[in-house]
């Protein structure tokens, strides 16, 4: 009987403190949940960044391991373009297309500093010149005829259509795409 009395006393004491015990357990649960949430958000950013950095490092390692003979790696610096990079490695900017293709660049105009590019082992590309349909221009002046363009005049005068800019500059053309039959152009030599 004595055990029954002791048990009843204990249950009575516990009932009296039931609200206090509930409050204490509630507080402990809130602390545990709060610390778990804090740890989750604290570690989430670090984990993702490390995964991304590891992925980038792995891709670079794979790219280096898979380099074909003669290929090189170039890290993009401030102010560089694919054209200037191609000039550096090939002596011709026209090879920028090869660099863009090997690196699967979606927009070759958007290059970020520090990005590493594979420089393929390809031959130097040069501008191709189309055979002139008309006579070669040898004099220092030329009169425009129907169907002429600065490009076609430069091809006939210099053998290089890319020199059309020299013609536009020498003749002070504000709109190089607009020339008229009868215009007399100076051909700088």
Image: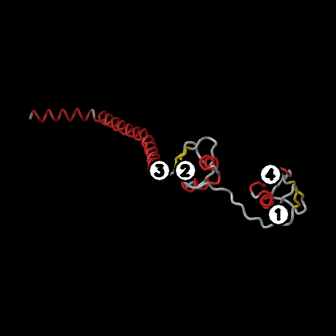
State the scheme by which the image is colored: secondary structure
Closer to viewer: mark 2 or mark 3: 2
Q: Which residue is mark 2?
A: 119
Q: Nearer the viewer, residue 116 or 21?
A: 116
Q: Residue 12, located in which quarter of the rendered image?
A: top left
**Which image quarter is the N terminus in?**
top left
CB contact under 8 Å: marks 1 and 3: no
Outermost residue to the front: 138
Query: Could you tell which of marks 4 and 3 lies nearer the N-terminus?
Result: 3
In the depicted structure, whether residue 84 falls above or below residue 30: below
Give the residue drawn at x 85%, y 66%: 146
Cα–Cα gap, marks 1 and 3? 48 Å
CA separation, marks 2 and 3?
11 Å
Separation of disc 1 and disc 2 at Cα?
39 Å
Residue 172 lies, in percent from the top left, at 86, 50
Q: Is residue 56 left or right of residue 184?
A: left
Q: Mark 2: which secondary structure?
A: strand
Please report contact status of discs 2 and 4: CB closer than 8 Å, yes or no.
no
Which disc number belongs to residue 63?
3
Residue pictured at 55% horizontal, 44% vertical:
75
Report whether 69 appears left or right of 159: left
Measure the alpha-carbon separation of dots 4 and 3.
42 Å
- The residue beneath circle 1 is 148
Q: Nearer the viewer, mark 1 or mark 3?
A: 1
Instruction: Rate crowding at label 2 as few (under 14), some (14 to 19) or many (20 or more) other CA atoms within 10 Å.
Output: many
Rendering quarter of residue 77:
top right
Say whether disc 1 or disc 2 marks the residue closer to the N-terminus: 2
Looking at the image, which residue is at 85% across and 54% down?
187
Residue position marked by numbered label 4 in the rendering = 166
Foreground of the two, 61 or 119? 119
């Amino acid at each position: 009987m004595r055990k029954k009395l002791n048990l009843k006393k204990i249950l009575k004491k516990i009932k009296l403190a039931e609200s206090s015990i509930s409050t204490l357990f509630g507080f402990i649960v809130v602390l545990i949940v709060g610390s778990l949430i804090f740890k989750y958000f604290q570690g989430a950013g670090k984990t993702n960044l490390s995964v991304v950095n590891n992925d980038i490092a792995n891709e670079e390692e794979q790219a280096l391991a898979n380099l074909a003979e003669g290929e090189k790696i170039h890290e993009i610096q401030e102010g560089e373009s694919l054209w200037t990079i191609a000039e550096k490695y090939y002596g011709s900017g026209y090879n920028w297309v090869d660099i863009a293709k090997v690196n699967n660049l979606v927009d070759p105009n958007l290059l970020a500093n520090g990005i590493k590019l594979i420089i393929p082992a390809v031959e130097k590309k040069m501008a191709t010149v189309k055979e002139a349909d008309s006579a070669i221009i040898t004099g220092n002046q030329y009169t425009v005829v129907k169907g002429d363009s600065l490009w076609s005049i430069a091809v006939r005068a210099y053998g290089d259509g890319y020199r059309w800019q020299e013609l536009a500059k020498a003749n002070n053309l504000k709109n190089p795409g607009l020339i008229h039959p009868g215009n007399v152009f100076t051909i700088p030599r």
